[in-house]
Structures are given as structure tokens and as C-alpha cells.
């Protein structure tokens, strides 16, 4: 869609030839912006509630800069995941307005901050051990960047279950819970058995030899005896946060449209 077509739609809305609902449907299908190494979907957020996100691990700093600059020019919420500190430093020299989160290994920009109307309640993020915190922080930064209230409870694994049981009130007041665990991956089953809210399990690659880089935790979570437990991929804190945000939204389409409009 070019500028002339967009102008035509807006003029038709003004004259009553096109309803606002019809115009919104047209705008949701706006084409992507083609860059040298990427094709950006600027209006993905209108359709899904989650904007285009940069996966930084396999990209050069220059590629991240080009994509991030294009997103910022559209006033889009910017998130770049799996960005190490050295790469982030190069990016921030060109785009100093971006914020780097070292534990989460994420760059963010144009955040609006949490707003009560963006969700039914608070997202609680729990992790089993201190070594699992980076994955938990990826969830935290993602959910907060998307405007949701987040609480955290770290290092409360099953090796010392009393640490978790001391916070049962927090478990019962959360709208949705993300549980991050490596080793044998038992913690999500325990949490799911203690609360009625949705629980999302995130296996991590933390553990000794037979953890097989998180596969043991993943299989343990997939075979959980706690019914209704959702499981995402190994170390996928970002994906867990996106699912938690979708649940916390409560399925209100108007809330989705209002909450994720351009900054």
C-alpha cells in the first residue's frame, strides 16, 4: 500500500464512504518494509499484539542497527533478543536511546511501561536456581516491554521446597505464572499443583551431563503429572513471556487494540 492509497482510505473515512472498521481492516494488511537483509512487518502488532522482534544471536551489529533504526522510525516498540554485551555496545554507539539488559541479553527501546489496563493482573516469573535467572530475565524484560506488570521469585527450586511454600500467597494472586527450571525440571509440576492460574514451563539448558542441554528438563515437563501445564522450548524465555502476555490480556480485542498501538 502506497501513500496515495492510504490517503484515499482516509478521505473515504472522512466522507463516510468507508467505515472506520473497514479502514482498520485495510490498515492491518499494510505491506512490509524491505531492507537489504530483512523484510519488516511494521503492523504485526495490530494483528497479533506482539511487534516484530529482532533475534540478534546470528545477526551482525550492523544488521541489528539497520533493522532497529527502521523500527524506531516507525515509533514501534523495539526488542532484540540474544544480543551479547559486545554486540550491544556496538549497536548502542549508533543508537544510544536503546537500553541494554545484560542478564536477559536484550536491547529494548520505545517502551511505554506497564499499564493496569493491559492485563487482567500480574505475571509472576519463578525460577528454580540462580543459574536459571538469565532465561527468567528474558521473560521479565519481554513482558514488561509489552506493558504488563511482572513480579519475580528466584532461586526457589525443589531442593529446598520450603522456599517456595513461603510465598503461596503470591502464587494465588498471580494472573499467569512462568516457571523456569533446569536439571530435572520438576518445579513447574509443583507450582502447577499449588495454583489454579495458567502455568507456563520453561526448561533451561542448565545441568550436568545427562541433562543433555535441557532435554531432560524438557521431557520431564512434557511428562508432568500436573494437568494443563504448558511447555515452551529450551531457554525460550521470550516465547514464554509472549504466551503469558496473550493469556494475561484476557482475550479482549479492544484491549489488544488500545494496548499495543504505536508509541
Image (cartoon, rainbow, N blue to C red):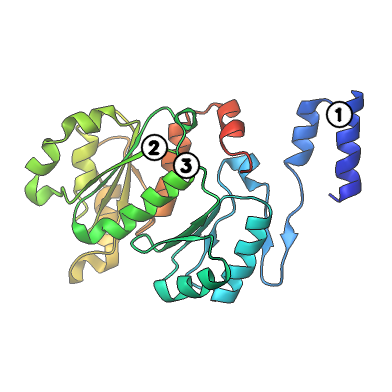
- Please determine whether, in this image, residue 174 is positioned above or below residue 202: above
Task: Answer with left or right where residue 112 lies relative to residue 237.
Answer: right
Give residue 132's quadrant in the image: bottom left
- Please determine whether, in this image, residue 197 is positioned above or below residue 145: above
- Report if residue 17 is visible in the image: no
Disc 3 residue crowd, few under 14, some 14–19, many 20+, Cα 10 Å: few
Q: What residue is shown at x 45% (from left), y 68% (from top)?
A: 83
Q: Which residue is mark 3?
A: 113
Q: Circle 3 — which element?
A: loop
What x and y, as percent, mark residue 200? 34, 43
Task: Answer with left or right where residue 49 lies relative to residue 187.
Answer: right
Q: What residue is shown at x 92% (from left), y 25% (from top)?
A: 15
User: Distance between the Cα atoms at labels 3 and 1?
Assistant: 32 Å
Task: Answer with left or right where residue 245 lies relative to residue 158.
Answer: right
Q: Quadrant of the C terminus?
A: top right
User: Distance between the Cα atoms at labels 2 and 3?
Assistant: 9 Å
Name the residue nearer the viewer: 243 or 9.
9
What x and y, as percent, mark residue 259? 56, 34
Q: What residue is shown at x 28% (from left), y 67% (from top)?
A: 213
Q: Nearer the viewer, mark 3 or mark 1?
A: 3
Q: Which residue is mark 2?
A: 149
User: Distance between the Cα atoms at labels 2 and 1?
Assistant: 36 Å
- Report if residue 213 is visible in the image: yes
Does label 3 or label 1 sit earlier along the sequence?
1
Q: Which residue is mark 1?
A: 13
Does label 2 or label 1 sit earlier along the sequence?
1
Disc 2 residue crowd, few under 14, some 14–19, many 20+, Cα 10 Å: many
Q: Circle 1 — which element?
A: helix
Q: Nearer the viewer, mark 2 or mark 3?
A: 3
Q: What residue is shown at x 47% (from left), y 70% (from top)?
A: 88
Amino acid at each position: 500500500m502506497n501513500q496515495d492509497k492510504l490517503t484515499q482510505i482516509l478521505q473515504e473515512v472522512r466522507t463516510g464512504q468507508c467505515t472506520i472498521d473497514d479502514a482498520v481492516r485495510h490498515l492491518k494488511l499494510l505491506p512490509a518494509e524491505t531492507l537489504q537483509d530483512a523484510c519488516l512487518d511494521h503492523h504485526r502488532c495490530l494483528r497479533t499484539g506482539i511487534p516484530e522482534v529482532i533475534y540478534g544471536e546470528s545477526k551482525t551489529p550492523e544488521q541489528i542497527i539497520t533493522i532497529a533504526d527502521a523500527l524506531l522510525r516507525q515509533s514501534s516498540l523495539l526488542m532484540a533478543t540474544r544480543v551479547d554485551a559486545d554486540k550491544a555496545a556496538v549497536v548502542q554507539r549508533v543508537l544510544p536511546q536503546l537500553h541494554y539488559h545484560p542478564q536477559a541479553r536484550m536491547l529494548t527501546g520505545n517502551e511505554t511501561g506497564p499499564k493496569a489496563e493491559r492485563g487482567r493482573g500480574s505475571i509472576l516469573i519463578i525460577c528454580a536456581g540462580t543459574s536459571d535467572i538469565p532465561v527468567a530475565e528474558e521473560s521479565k524484560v519481554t513482558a514488561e516491554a509489552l506493558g504488563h506488570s511482572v513480579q519475580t521469585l528466584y532461586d526457589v527450586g525443589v531442593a529446598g521446597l520450603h522456599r517456595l511454600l513461603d510465598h503461596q500467597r503470591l502464587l494465588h494472586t498471580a494472573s499467569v505464572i512462568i516457571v523456569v527450571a533446569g536439571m530435572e525440571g520438576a518445579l513447574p509440576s509443583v507450582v502447577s499443583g499449588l495454583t489454579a492460574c495458567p502455568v507456563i514451563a520453561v526448561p533451561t539448558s542448565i545441568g550436568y551431563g545427562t541433562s543433555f542441554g535441557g532435554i531432560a528438563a524438557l521431557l520431564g515437563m512434557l511428562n508432568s503429572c500436573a494437568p494443563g501445564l504448558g511447555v515452551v522450548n529450551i531457554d525460550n524465555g521470550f516465547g514464554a513471556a509472549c504466551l503469558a502476555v496473550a493469556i494475561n490480556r484476557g482475550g479482549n480485542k479492544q484491549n489488544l487494540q488500545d494496548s499495543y498501538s504505536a508509541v
